[in-house]
Image (spheres, rainbow, N blue to C red):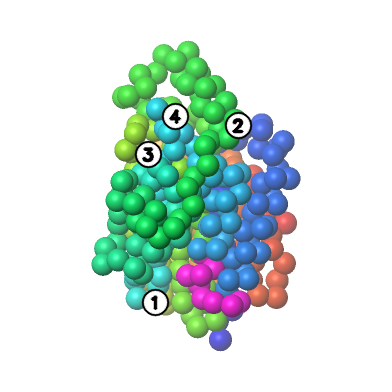
Amino acid sequence: MPREVLVIHGGAGRFRPSILEERAAIEEALRSALYDGMSALSSGNALDAVEAAVKSMEGSGVFNAGKGASLNLLGEQELDASVMFGRDLSFGAVASLKYTWNAVSLARKVMERTDHVFLVGYGADKLAEALGFERIPPPSPRLLERYRELLEKVRSLGYDLWRRNFEIVRLFLPDTVGAVALDRDGNLAAATSTGGLWLKLPGRVGDTPLPGAGVYAENGVVAVSATGIGELIARYLAAARVAFKVKSGVSVEQAVRDVVHEVTRLFSEENTIGLIALDAAGNIGIHSNCEVFLRGYTFKGGEPRVALLGSEEPH
Ligand code: ASP
């Protein structure tokens, strides 16, 4: 019987001093997500586990997803999320949600309750409303303050807000959330959820809801969730590349290292990608080129472990 394993991330990117001030809250939110995901894994399957873990992080307000989602250039929240079940490659995604915080569960509804795989904007929010999803609360004072600070900083640096968005995103940490799980029946699942990049152009969608980019799961092979600069991750199809490597016999640890290395070399830049992955035997691959990589894992009968800095061992 395969061992039950759950791996999560809460985003990756550049170091910022506030991460150390917020350490206790971040670690607690990661541990709660591991707890919620593991409870779902014990009573259900891998899909239930990734949904529960991601929902927990969306609801915490601590990460750039769900209630804590970043604000776009106009100061609005626009959420993207996806979920994939390796048993039959079923997939669901939503993007540019404006009124619904629990994006991952809505992505699962798209997968299970509609004939489609991807709903965006108005249609996705309408589905959420019809299914009785809670509306997203107004952005917290902390988010509004960060929005104002960033806008000022960007203006003082003289960036063109509409055309140099890619430079703007390098100024701060993204904090997207994701999870991968393996259940006792050998099913693999993955989910990813984000508010996207701070000050993104309205309507911008990154890698998070794209299969093979920010998420992928296939039984017998691997489950992957990515975080980082979506424009690069999507162009490189990072999650799919991990899967191809594992399929061709590369270990999951090596596959995530290779893909992070390739992305770094191709785009000549660090602090651009973090990957978590899990193979069919429950081996874990976690790697990033980032100073900060919020992450954690647990397995049946084991202690949950979490880490914040890229250089730090999960504890
Ligand atoms: N990958 C996400 C995006 O580009 C951001 C993140 O990972 O934090 O939308």
Give the extent of the magenta segment.
42-50
Tags 4 and 3 touching, CB below 8 Å: no
CB under 8 Å between callouts 3 and 2?
Answer: no
User: What x and y, as percent, mark residue 143?
Assistant: 56, 32
Instruction: Tell me the element at label 3.
Output: helix
Name the residue at the bottom extreme.
1
The answer for how far apart the CA atoms under marks 3 and 2 are is: 32 Å
Q: Position of residue 186 (x, y in %)?
A: 48, 80
Q: Is residue 248 visible?
A: no
Indicate the amino acid at tag 3. Answer: Phe
Please identify the quadrant where the N terminus is shown. bottom right
Q: Which callout, 3 or 1, points at the residue further toward the start of the chain?
A: 1
Residue where numbered disc 1 is placed? 87
- Percent of width and height locating residue 50: 51, 64
Q: Is residue 31 left or right of residue 79?
A: right
Element type where label 2 sits in the image: helix
Residue assigned mark 2: 142
Whether residue 95 is in magenta: the answer is no
Q: Earlier in the sequence, mark 4 or mark 2?
A: 4
Q: CA distance from mark 3 to mark 1?
A: 34 Å
